[in-house]
Image (cartoon, rainbow, N blue to C red):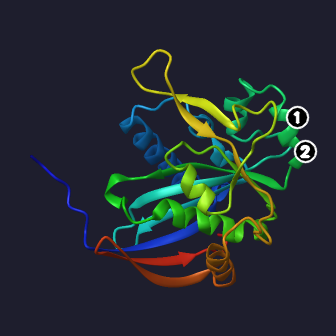
Amino acid sequence: MHTSIIPQKMNIRIRVLHAIDYPEIAKEFQRKHTAVLEEFGVKGVGSVSNKWWEYAGSYMFIAEDIETGEMGAGMRLDVIDPTHDIPMEEAIERFSPNFRTIIHKYDNVLAESCGLWVDKKFSERKLPKNLMRAAIAISSKLRIYHLVSLPHECTLPMTQALGYTIVDQDGLGDHGTYNYPPKPNTDNECYKSTLVELLDTVNLPSMSEKERDLTFWLRNHPTQSINEEIKGRVTKLSYDLRLM
């Protein structure tokens, strides 16, 4: 039986890119994201259904092996504006027709945290949380003051640890929870995803003090390197959160 061996040490760079300026990297991001979803049999996810790299309001946060240049994880911030829907709109509007009216009240200052994926080779290194924290840290510098997301039930606790709160509002799902996306190889079953929000990216009042300190530190030091040890594996994370 073949078993993959995760390297004991990996040097990873996390950086942010304006997607419209890096279409080839964005297409590689899309290809990798789609491959991860297909591996789990998931189809019909809004964040992979359009050419988001042609939109000026899309920002990529990517994690890549410094030595090889291989992209191993990523996520996006997609800003909403009067002419551009964010990915979750298509999913939620089917269940909550008033959602579009509600969300477009925040045109140009709200973004969806979406398109999160991790290649198996890069797993167990807390990259999803590090990517999301990086996005939160610099979002206000991008003039994004509100964030929303639609995490799967497995990743909901991580978003809550980063200060997101469940949107429990009449007319928006079952206490914010939706049956989305469809489960593979089933006719009627769906995963559960929950609408969450982070309403103040400047002051981050919904975060714990420890997490807020980490995020502010990253905001104030956008280029830096740290070592993290997880399950005996050392990962050197080099951040470059200057917009390129």
Label 1 crowd (10 A; few <14 / some 14-19 / many >=20) = few
Amino acid beneath label 1: Thr
Label 2 crowd (10 A; few <14 / some 14-19 / many >=20) = few
CA gap between label 1 and label 2 equals 7 Å
Give the answer, above or below, for where 64 lies relative to 50: below
In the image, what residue occupies the spot 39% across and 36% down? Answer: 40
Q: Position of residue 20 (x, y in %)?
A: 67, 54
Q: Position of residue 195 (x, y in %)?
A: 68, 42
- Seen from the viewer's position, the closer of residues 184 and 141 is 184
Secondary structure of residue under mark 1: helix
In the image, what residue occupies the spot 54% across and 84% down? Answer: 224
Task: Say which residue label 1 marks.
Answer: 101
The number of callouts visible is 2
Give the answer, above or below, for where 101 lies relative to 15: above
Numbered tag placed on residue 20 in the rendering = none
Q: Position of residue 99 (x, y in %)?
A: 81, 33
Q: Are marks 1 and 2 in contact (CB under 8 Å)?
A: yes
In the image, what residue occupies the spot 53% across and 63% down? Answer: 129
- Seen from the viewer's position, the closer of residues 161 and 53 is 161
Residue 82 in view, yes or no:
no
Amino acid beneath label 2: Lys
Task: Say which residue label 2 marks.
Answer: 105
Q: Quadrant of residue 132?
A: bottom right
Give the answer, above or below, for where 207 lies relative to 229: above
